[in-house]
Structure formats: structure tokens, C-alpha cells
Image (cartoon, rainbow, N blue to C red):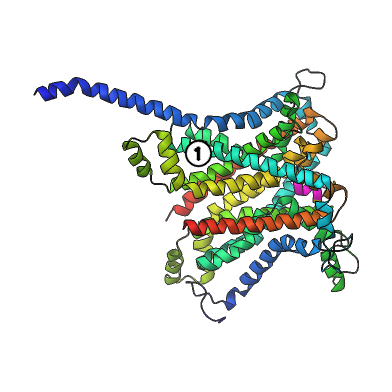
Amino acid sequence: MTLAMDGAPGMPLNRAMLKSARRRERRIFSGLALPALVLVACILLIPFAWLAWLSLFDAAGNLSAQNYARLLRPAYVGSFLTTFKVAGLVTALCVVFGYPVAYLLSQLSARAAQILLVFVILPFWTSVLVRTYAWLVLLQRNGVINDWLLSMGVIDEPLALVHNLTGTIIGMVHVMLPFLILPLYASMKAIDPVLLRAAANCGASPSQAFRQVFLPLSMPGLASGIALTFVLCLGFYLTPALLGGGRVAMWSTQIADAVSKFSNWGAASALSVALLVVTAVVLWGVRRLTDALSFSAGKP
Amino acid sequence: MLNTPATSTQVTHGQRLWLYATVALVMTFLVIPCILVIPMSFSDSQYLEFPPRSLSLRWYEAFFTSPEWIQSAVVSLKVAGLTTVLATVLGTLASYGLYKATSLFTPITRGLLMLPMMIPLIFVAIGVFFVYARFGLNNTITGLVLAHTTLAIPFVMIAVGNGLKSFDPNLERAARSLGASPVTAFLTVTLPQIRISVFSGMLFAFVTSFDEVVVSLFVSSGANSTLTKRMFANIRDQVDPTVAAISSMLVALSIVVLIAAQFVKRKDA
């Protein structure tokens, strides 16, 4: 009895102390993310807010929509269209070439897949600049590809493969393929092979089993791969700048030119804000789509 | 051989030849530019050709005897080294903090810290260039390191986060109940357990900084130009075979990194 009497007033105190100690600890742990957060704020968020603010004023310093109205000029509209065309084309080519690779990788034994994956991961780890340079050398007028085609008699004179749209697309597909293959492969690995065997048992032909079971189940992975590729293409600067030879005006090259050639910060900031908004909208839209797809794929 | 079944749905290897052919073509496409540049860099002539007519180390010599190239390589190594240290520390701390304390703000914090991976680099480049101009950080090592660290943090966080996912939190609880302070418990129990993930995060951070071009293009110049900035200018203005020699060395470096990563993974397994 006395024991209980002794313990009773102590218990709430103990619990309160533990609770406050836990809360203090949690605050300290949350604080661990603070240095990184401050850095991201200084390097990303402040510049973004500053540029967004800047984009609302004209050259004389008056509040105006001039910078955004300028985006409707033919030169800029043309570059938006080029950007979407290139991003769409590159993404489509990546799907056509990447899907079979991811499919085969997902069907192989772990050991064989590991060996073949090196072919995907080596370019992934190699600098984009090095790969773009390599394509420049291979595709140029007196480059290796033209030499081979000439000596095999496929063509009579060298093709213009670089410093134009063709070169840009080839280089970009090369950079983007691993971004599509790797997430797609991961999601295909997660598809239970028993489902395909079940389909075969139920009398499905191999192509039926693939079309009605495997393909729908791989859709969420494909959608996120496509989203990643498309969004990366939208803001891609390096390869279009080098392989496009100034003939492929993309969104990103326009932003760079506005700053480095014309020092026009109003135009550059309006272009950047528009690019970020489109990127965010695409990401958001695809996430909705992926959710819908994985929901319908999960249905019996 | 061709008539044996390849899958559980009874497709034979013969019926899948087209699949093998397509994959072989794509794999060739992926690897060829990385590999062909190596023999071409040993060419003796001003024009890069394959196969090279006569071999020489001329372009490697051109790189190692040029003060400008060496200077920019040193800048790149210095920046990448400092970035690796800073990003690994900040990224690991953030990842661990978010793992330990989940609150309403956790998803927002994580989202903000992942942002640098999703935002177009060209935007980061001009934003940083604009803000640095006001603080005199353009063309400085400090400026480059801060920008590269921001870009590398998400990669460190992903790597460390993966390590923490498979870490048994009871081990740390045991240490704490035996009287270890949170710091001691982290340093002596948690960190050794997730060291492989931290190491792969470091690798990612180094490569992110060393290979970064677009931000360096805007915020580095003169004596503090990075190797990639100088290569970019060189590729755009003239195709100088010295770049082929540098590229070959970088490809060799990425092969080494790949092997190191595989080795670490195998040791981990």
C-alpha cells in the first residue's frame, strides 16, 4: 500500500520527464538536417525567388509583364516547340530501344543480368561531356561513321550527322537511355514470374501472356522512366549546345544565351521560371498517371 | 539450343532471336563511344581516326606538359575532394536526422533536399551565377564547392537512406540503454554498420562534382577554371585531340570506379 502511495505521485512526473526528454532529442535530430537545408536554400531557393522577382520588372525597373510577353515572340515559341519535339522524340526512341533491354535483363539469371548491366552502367558513370565529345568525333564529316559508310558503299558522300538535329538526338538518346532502362528494369524485376506461368496454364499464348499480363504490370515503371527522361530532356543543356552546333535552339540554350551573350536577366529569368513551371507540371501529371496506372494494374 | 524454351511461357530461344539482336545493337550503341575514344586518343595525327594509322603518346604529352590543362585538373580535383567531404557530412547528417525524427516536416524537408537532383542544371547555373555576382563568389573555389555540394547532397542522401533502411534500429537502442550518448551510439554502432552506403555516397559525390559542367561553365573561369569547363570550351571552339586523351583517362577512371563499386557491393553481400 505504501509502495503504491510512493509510486503514484512519481509516475506522472517520470512520464512527463521522459516525454520532454524525447521531444528534446527529436528536436536535436531534426536539427541535423538544418545545415544541408540552409545550403539548399542559399544555392537554390534564394536565387529562384530572386530571379522570379526580377522577371516581374522591365528594363526601366517598372512592374510589368513585358518579360513574359516576350516569351510569345516567334523565336522563343520556336525554341519551346523544338524543346518539346526533341524531348518527345528522344523519349520515344529511348522507350523503343530501352524496353527490350530492360525486358531481357529482367528475364535473365542474376549473374547474366549483372554482366549485361555493365553495358548500361558504364556509360552511366562516364561523364556526359566525354560521351558527347566521343559522338562529335564519331559523327563528324570525316569521322568514323561516315568513313565506314563510305567504304561499305552505303553512301556516296559524307552525311551531315552532327551540328544539327540528328546529332543532338543521337547524343541525347545515348545519355538518356540508362535513365529509362534502370528504373524500368527494377520495376520489371518486381513482377512475379508465377503470374506469367499462370497465364500460360490458363491457355494464353506467349504473346498474349506478354500483352495481357507483363505489359500492364510494367506500365507504372515505364511511366516513371518516361517522366524522368522527358523532364531531364526539357532542361538539358550540354549535348544540344555541343552537338547542335548552334542550329538547335532549345529552351536551355536560349536561357544560356540570354545570360552570356545578351546579359538580359529579365528574359533569362522569365524563361527559367517558365521552364521550372513546365517541369513541375509534367512531374505532377505523371505522378497522377502513375498512381492511376498502378491502381488499375493492381486490380484483379 | 535454339529450340529449347527460354521462358516459362514456352517461347524458344529461336523465337526470341530478334530480341537478342535488338539488345545486342543497343548495348553496342551504349558502349561504343566510351570505348572507341581510347584507341583514337593514341593517334599520331591531328585528325582523330579509327583505327589510328600510327600510334603515339603525343596527346597525352600535350596534356601533361600544358600548365593550363594541369592547373584546371588540379582545380577540379580540389573542388571534387572538398565537395566529397562536405556533401558526405551534410548528406549523412540530414539522412540520419530524418531517419531518427519523423514529424510533419519530414516529407517537406526531404523534398527540399532532393530538389537539386530534379531542377534543370541550366537553371541552377544562372541562379548561382546571379547570386554569386553579388557576394564575389564567382570564379572562386568556395563558390564551386558550395554549388557542387548542393548538387551532390541528394545522391549521398539516397545512398545513406538505403543503408539506414536495412539497419536494425535495435542495435542503436541497445547501445543507448547501456549508457552510450546519442553521439557515441551513432559513431560506434550506427556509422560502422552503414559505412558501405556512406562510402558509395562519397563516390557519387566525387563523380557529381568532378563531372559537373554546366554550373562550372558559368561560375568558374581564369585560374579557377575546372577541367570540364576548359574541355567544353575546347570542344566547342576546335576539336583538339588533347581532349581525346583526357576523355580516355576519364573513361578509365569511370571503369575503376565501377569496379570499386562492384567490389564494395560484393564485400557487403
Which residue is the extreme one toward the right?
Answer: A157
What chain does badge 1 belong to? B
Q: Main secondary structure of the magenta part?
A: helix
* Residue nearest the viewer, comparing B146 with B102: B146
Quadrant of the drawing holding the N terminus of chain B: bottom right
Using residue B194 as the reference point, say whether residue B233 is left or right of it: right
| Magenta stretch, residue numbers | A237-242
Residue B89, magenta (yes or no): no
Q: Position of residue A298 (x, y in %)?
A: 45, 53
Q: Which of the 4 image quadrants contains residue B49?
A: bottom right
Q: Position of residue B246 (x, y in %)?
A: 77, 54
Location of mark 1 (residue): B95
Q: Secondary structure at mark 1?
A: helix
Residue A108 appears in the picture as rendered:
no
Residue placed at 78% from the left, 47% from the top? B70
Q: Position of residue B239 (x, y in %)?
A: 86, 53
Residue placed at 80% from the left, 45% from the top? B230
Residue A238, magenta (yes or no): yes
Q: Position of residue A253 (x, y in %)?
A: 79, 41
Residue placed at 47% from the left, 59% from the top? A191
Q: Type of residue at label 1? A: Ser
Using residue A220 as the reference point, say whether residue A56 is left or right of it: right
Using residue A47 as the reference point, say whether residue B236 is left or right of it: right
Residue placed at 33% from the left, 26% from the top? A19
